[in-house]
Image (cartoon, grey):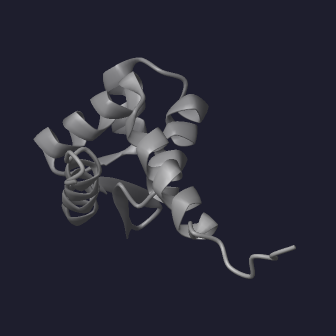
Amino acid sequence: MIIKTRSLIDRKKLKTAILRLRAIDHELRKDIIDYLDDVGRASVTEIHLRFRLEQSVTSQHLAILRRSEVVETARNGKEIYYSVNHKMLVQINAAVDEFNKPLSH
């Protein structure tokens, strides 16, 4: 019997990739990303007013985007402002492009 001592797939890296892809594969979060890209930065209050959402719902979606590093935060007094992490989106797009390339034989 052969016992494998290592996995062919790094599960931690895979979990992080899945987290990031799921974060951006959601219509409301896509709209929030587009809005932040248009305005540069916005607070939770500005975002929840723009999309007519409960502030708690807005905060939950922003937390998902923040954990996946798709948005960045900056504090100004008591207010936290969110902006798009363009470097992460470029990295995600490059990975998706690479993943979708046909395999060479």
Q: Position of residue 66 (x, y in %)?
A: 46, 56
**Residue 57 vs residue 78, the one in the foreground:** 57
Q: Quadrant of the N terminus?
A: bottom right
**Residue 48 vs residue 5, the one in the foreground:** 5
Which residue is the extreme one toward the bottom? Answer: 5
Total marks shown come to: 0
**Which residue is pictured at 38% across the width and 39% down the height?**
24
- Horizontal side of 85 relative to 66 (left or right) equals left
Q: Quadrant of the C terminus?
A: bottom left
Q: Position of residue 85 (x, y in %)?
A: 26, 60
| Residue 4 picture quarter | bottom right
Q: Position of residue 19 (x, y in %)?
A: 52, 50
Image vertical order of residue 69 relative to residue 34, above or below: below
- Horizontal side of 93 relative to 15 (left or right) equals left
- Horizontal side of 34 relative to 67 (left or right) equals left
**Which residue is pictured at 20% across the width and 48% down the height?**
101
**Which residue is pictured at 42% across the width and 28% down the height?**
26
**Which residue is pictured at 29% across the width and 28% down the height?**
31
Which residue is the extreme one toward the left? Answer: 38
Image vertical order of residue 78 relative to residue 49, above or below: below
Q: Position of residue 88 (x, y in %)?
A: 28, 62
